[in-house]
Image (cartoon, helix red, strand yellow):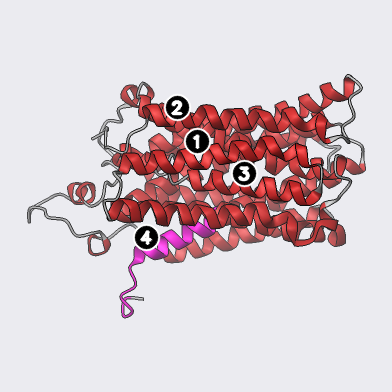
Amino acid sequence: MARMKFPRRYVIVLLTFICTNVCYIERVGFSIAYTVAADAINVNQANKGMILSMFYYGYVLSQIPGGWAAQRLGGRRVLLLSFVLWSLICGLVPLDPSRVVILVLSRLFVGVAQGFIFPAIHTVLAQWVPPQERSRSVSLTTSGMYLGAAGGMLFFPSLVKHMGPQSVFFVEAVLGVAWSVIWLKFSSEPPRTDLPKVAMPKVASREKIKAQAGGVVAPRTVKIPWRRIIFSLPVWAIVVNNFTFHYALYVIMNWLPTYFELALKLSLQDMGSSKMLPYFNMFIFSNIGGVVADHLITKRILSVTKTRKVLNTIGFVVAAIALMALPSFGTPSGTVICSSVALGFLALGRAGFAVNHMDVAPKFAGIVMGVSNTAGTLAGIVGVGLTGNILEAAKASNMDLTSSETWKTVFFVPGYLCIFSSVIFLIFSTGEKIFE
């Protein structure tokens, strides 16, 4: 690798891409496997929503601790420990919908373990990636989520059909352990030679070198400005958009299979490769957003602030339109197109709010990501659970769950949230560094 002069930071970005890929394979895989197993014993929609949302209860508990741990222990160690923990749980726990307590605890602990991952990734990327490469690096890393979701949607329905729901847990455990071994072997702390070149005095501390080289996380002895972070309007602009992004994503990820089966009379096994298109579209648009953002910034076509606002607004407004149009089609092809457009443009919007963590607080990227992703995780708890209750209330009111009209509320809520969030980001966000 040294002979090829291939910068090690590219290896780190690639490994974090694979990391998010595997994480979302696990999340989509559980949703598919549990839905099949639960339907086999007639678990009602509210209870299904409760089990599906339990992951996010654990996830929300470890977001801010994950940022703190990555700051103090290092993102590399935290990522490794998180992966090993959730992989062991997947490998050891039986998927039996009748054993509710075991499922609740297992999903809770998997959520806790995975909650450390994204704050740790942002800490690692802040150490390794120079400012001019941030948009496309973060976009590539996060696009792994969508490629993982696409792969899970394509592969797992057939696996469940032929080998049963439990086989999904085995595959997820193997992937998690495999990534852990690769990460342990190929990852490292950032050496000075791989950091971007900057002018600096000859005599400088290692922490100062890192801090000057592209906005690295602060030295571990520096006090974290919690009060300023919590009361910062630009941070809140990121938080609101992270909440909305994940509300829409998690509702579609967890409930779109049920919509296909109830409203469109079509199972995932019968959909072929079309079921992966929404997530594959996210993969494509996420990387387009990153490349476009870096081009606008490096060529000085737009400022960092304007670049973030433009891409975020386009992404969220188009997504809102597609979400609200989705139940109006009432056909499999129309649903796939609308969900693909919605998720694709939401992914494009990540070149706005998601990279903004490292713009406003490069030294504390993991901490701000932990705060922001706490809101995103709360969206999973609220959105997935609320959707189950909406459907149960509709059923109690003698509304037909097989009619797409009944599902309008499910998709209109994230649509309105997208419009609201884009306005908040336009007004309050900035691309300038506000935390030293």
Q: Would residue 348 be visible to someone looking at this image?
A: yes
Mark pair 1, 4: CA separation: 25 Å
Secondary element type, mark 1: helix
Secondary element type, mark 3: helix
Please state the horizontal and vertical placement of residue 87, each as a whole percent of the image. 63, 52
Q: How crowded is mark 4: few (under 14 residues within 10 Å), some or many (20 or more)?
A: some
Find the magenta span and give its range: 2-20
Q: What residue type is labelled 3?
A: Ala
Residue nearer the viewer, 15 or 320: 320
- CB within 8 Å, label 1 to label 4: no
Q: What residue type is labelled 4?
A: Ser
The quarter holding residue 280 reads bottom right
Image mark for residue 342: 3
Q: Is residue 421 above or below residue 322?
A: above
Q: Earlier in the sequence, mark 3 or mark 2?
A: 3
Please state the horizontal and vertical placement of residue 354, each as a whole percent of the image. 44, 42
